[in-house]
Image (spheres, helix red, strand yellow):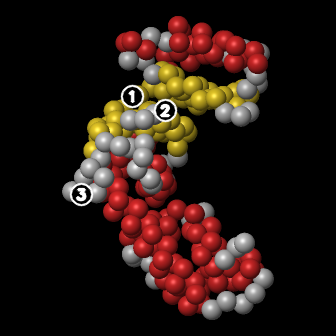
Amino acid sequence: MESVSSMVKYLLENKPFLLDALSRGILSLGNLASEFKPDIEKALDKEIKETAVVMALRRYGDEIRAHQELSVSSGISGEILMKTNICDFNVQKSTNLLAKLKNLYSMVNIERGDFLNIIVGNNEISISVSEKYFSKIEEFLRGEKLFNRSRGLVSLTVIFDGDFLHTPGIVSQVMHRFAWENINIYEIVSTMTELTFVIENKNSIKGYEVLQKYLEHMQGR
């Protein structure tokens, strides 16, 4: 059942800039409550007090800050690895493609540092690979239904030193920071110790700075 608190979270999750400002404590809760009140009343089909929205906003802001403080106190640090000249393919999942995906690993020279990430979804498959293999991948995907292909991308990988996997909120916080800087994310790949973002080359320096500042925040600096 929907409530004032759940609606406040819903409205904020769809507005990452407001969510970030709330976590920093730089929002006017009264003004934001006044803006949210009509939408919440419509969703709940009843009148509510503006003070109830303010209270929900304050509680959610405290909750976000508590998660951020947990991340800072977790002792997690890391280093950032950037790889340039990446391309990305998004293709419809098919039995034929699944059967031959393993062949990609023999096409790409991973031992020499070439980039390759394959994400298999419910209906689609994404392939991010070093751009020098662009023509080979196009030929490899011939006959498959291709939704999108992009060039001129970079990958930014954070290699964590600490329990990244069991520390809640890290991916969400980084994504909010990217959204705040208007950085579009093409792919996200994670393992137990690594978190990789594939973004446009024009945002590479800005994206690196976002991750660097976040790592400094995690270390309490």
Query: Where on the picture, by quarter, is residue 20?
Result: bottom left
Type of amino acid under label 3: Gly
- On the image, the x and y values in percent for residue 100 come to 67, 12
Which residue lies under the disc numbered 2? 153
Q: Looking at the rendered structure, which numbered label has been put on residue 83?
A: 1
Q: Position of residue 93 (x, y in %)?
A: 73, 26
Q: Is residue 140 left or right of residue 112?
A: right
Q: Position of residue 116 (x, y in %)?
A: 50, 22
Q: Which mark is residue 220?
A: 3
What amino acid is at disc 2?
Answer: Leu
- Of 119 and 137, nearer the camera is 119
The secondary element bearing badge 3 is classed as: loop
Number of the front mark, 2 or 3: 3
Marks 1 and 3, Cα distance to the nearest angstrom?
Answer: 27 Å
Considering the numbered disc 1 on the image, is that residue within a helix, a strand or a loop? strand
Which quadrant would the C terminus be assigned to in this image? Answer: bottom left
Q: How crowded is mark 1: few (under 14 residues within 10 Å), some or many (20 or more)?
A: some
